[in-house]
Amino acid sequence: MSLRVNYRVANQGAFKAMMALEQHISGQFEDKPLYELLKIRVSQINGCAFCLDMHAKDLLKLGDYADHILLLSVWREVPLFTEKERVMLELAEAVTLISEQGVPLELYEKVREHFSEAELVDLIMAINTINSWNRIAITTGMYPGCFN
């Protein structure tokens, strides 16, 4: 298996721009496990093997989150996730699948119970950033270990 194109080499300016956005957004999250859960869930929805592999490993480096990773796709069905995590996951799904129903006002109000306006913007930017990374990885044929 090989990459269709190594976007990191083919267009270094675009790669640097994406990395600058990633670095800015990642710096906004004090709760790193929450940030990794967001990236894993969006990557699950989008079917991005490269990002799933990377962010699951990143979350495991932060502690004992194996159950979170294993049960993330069924987060609504299990009591493992906190209310804050649930609200974030629901927002991540709504923004990722925005063409289906937008972001309902009821969801926005739930998000605002747990996150400030600035944190909401950070969440939206993080969701959009991982969606962009997923689309780059899938389109260019990235797979786990392709840059090793």
Image: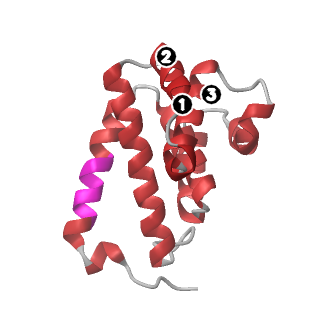
Q: Which mark is residue 86?
A: 3
The answer to whether residue 74 is left or right of residue 11 is right
Q: Secondary structure of the magenta portion, mostly?
A: helix
Determine whether label 1 and label 3 are within 8 Å by CB: yes
In the rendered structure, are the residues bearing label 2 and label 3 in contact, judged by CB atoms less than 8 Å apart? no
Residue 124 appears at what percent x and percent y?
A: 39, 38
Residue that mark 1 sits on: 88
Magenta segment includes 108: no
Compare residues 136 and 69 and report the one nearer the observer.
Answer: 136
CA separation in Å, label 2 and label 3? 10 Å
Query: Residue at point 53% right, 58% down?
Result: 51
Q: Which amino acid, by three-letter code, is at mark 3?
A: Arg
Q: Which percent across, then down, holds residue 21?
A: 27, 49
* Quadrant in the picture for residue 29: top left
Category of crowding for the residue at label 2, using alpha-carbon neighbours closer than 10 angstroms: few (below 14), some (14–19), many (at least 20): some
Q: Is residue 16 left or right of residue 102?
A: left
CA distance separating discs 1 and 3: 5 Å
Element under disc 3: helix
In the image, which residues are magenta? 15-22
Residue in the picture at 57% in, 67% down: 144
